[in-house]
Image: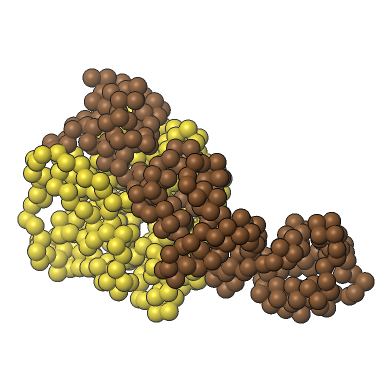
Amino acid sequence: MNRFNFPDLGIGVGLRTVHFSHILGSQPDVDWFEALSENYMDTGGRPRYVLEKIAEQYPIVLHGVSLSIGGTDPLDFDYLRKLKSLARTVNARWISDHLCWTGVSGRNVHDLLPMPYNVESLRHTAERVRVVSDFLETPLVVENPSSYVEFATSTMTEWDFLASLAEESDCGLLLDVNNIYVSSFNHGFDPNVYVDAIPDDRVVQVHLAGHQNHSTHIIDTHNDFVIDEVWKLYGRACARSGDVATLLEWDADIPDFPTVHAEAKKASAFRSAGSGEWGVGSGTPGPDLAPALPLPTPQTPHPEVPHAV
Amino acid sequence: MQSDVALAPLQEWMQSVVTHPSDVYEAADAAEIAVDDVILPSRTLQPIQRVGIYHGMYMLRMIEALTVDYAAVAQFLGEHAFEHLVRDYVQQFPSRSYTFNRLGDSLPEYLASSTWKRRTFLRDLAKLELAMTHVFDEAEAEPLPADAIASIAPEEIADARIIPIPALRLLALDYDVNDAFQAFRDERPMKPRRQKSWLAIHRRDYGVYRMPLTREAYVFLESLAARQTIGSAIETFHRRFRRFPAQSDLFTWFRDWSATGLFTAIEAE
């Protein structure tokens, strides 16, 4: 159990509009749903109606993309008020967003832009996390992003930054193991070191997703099945943190709900302290798991236009 | 290597590069700080290529979001022209909201003042799609029972206000874009037809509907939507058309609009 006593909700699925009818009609045996906050804050239409219906039957967690916790514009308290109101309406178990910034000078780029990892941005972000947590009256849960650049001004690793941020701001962590894999490929670090460095008592939730490998870099597209290397990282995280609320994100080329749900349920093999068939805690590698993380093969740089996330 | 860029100028720099309308190389040339001073290379990509990933994704997201909101405009223009339109539009009207839902709010205004061929048709088509988006997201309200208006005492009718549901938008248009939009829905070619038209866009049971109106019905319903009393709405009608609405028209309008669920409350003076 994490230090915040946020419960292990089991294995959940990201709530997407293409699945609304299936979920309302079939009431699938899903442990919980994660809803993208911004999709429901400003609507009184069908999305909000469906979310409230689903919240009557399933635990809901709110996951945001526009808080801009690392941004240098002032915090948007209108946004935070609406977020808090929505969280109360759907009885959100917790609220998460990304370690990133989304725009400055009043603009929103609608992307999870990366932070430089140094003392200045650590202090800046930690102060904002404290303000947001106070306002929301619940510890904010911060997710590690996937990124495609590293800044010359960085003086610490992302995992050290995240651990320090959690300590200084007393926030929870949403460990996205796919993002760790994506960033490790793009920046050339060992993802196992990252997972091992995260303070496990602050991990409230884990994210899983698929991505697109462009050989020179990986884009976090959430448009495919989870690859074996990411499952292996998930198993490593489970072995450290114990059972923790786990969620599969699928945002593009979304298949039918049973397919998404079946992919999410693969996580059950790694849970219960890693004692499952695939669990790394048992010392038995899962089927088809790569023995080691492949390093990117140097090729002629060719930054393809990535899919929108 | 300039490695002492503070957080705020670094974010300003990166945003200027990522949102630049041209390619990432021109974006980098236009920026005050050299890319190599800010971004490190990876084993496979140079700094310019790494920041180029964000640059490429930015415009794709804008195009994707506006294609969802303006599917008919996008279809009419074709992929290449619509992409060009989006690049120009987001330069003039960049997103300033935490939600993508507001990104396209200024597209009709942009089109009206643009030099695009068929801009008046495109503006009206965009107005229709924007109204549908707004109606989709408006707050839900219980519609009045169909017989509620008929039950108002005769001596109170003139001073009564009939309050429309929030999910209602009224449009006065220079083109018959309702017909064009239906063609789009039916996967037929959209043919711009210059003809004044009036529409009520409304929502019922979470479905969005388009209701064609006559000019007279539009003027009367617009007055009610502006919270005029029924008596004032009739006076407005008289000023506009130099005649009073026919009793039969009033009866038909109230009957049809009530049955459609356009009203949510009656307020007496």
What chain is the yellow one?
A
| Residue A94 can be seen, yes or no | no
The quadrant in which residue B136 appears is bottom right
Which x, y percent locates residue A187?
18, 39
**Quadrant the C terminus of chain B occupies:** bottom right
| Residue A23 can be seen, yes or no | yes
**Quadrant the N terminus of chain B occupies:** top left
Side of B75 relative to A53 (left or right): left
Color scheme of the displayed model: by chain
Q: Is residue A308 above or below residue A12?
A: above
Q: Nearer the viewer, residue A43 or B79?
A: B79
- Rendered hue of chain B is brown
Q: Nearer the viewer, residue A129 or A220?
A: A220
Q: Nearer the viewer, residue A164 or A184?
A: A184
Side of B260 relative to B65 (left or right): right
Which x, y percent locates residue A34?
39, 61
The quadrant in which residue A21 appears is bottom left
Side of A113 relative to A299 (left or right): right
Q: Is residue B179 above or below residue A22?
A: above
* Image point (29%, 68%), residue name: A255
Which x, y percent locates residue B44?
13, 38
The furthest residue to the right? B155
Which x, y percent locates residue B30?
34, 25
Q: Exactly how many numbered labels are in the figure?
A: 0
Q: Is residue A150 above or below residue A304?
A: above
* Image point (54%, 60%), residue name: B193
* Image point (77%, 66%), residue name: B162
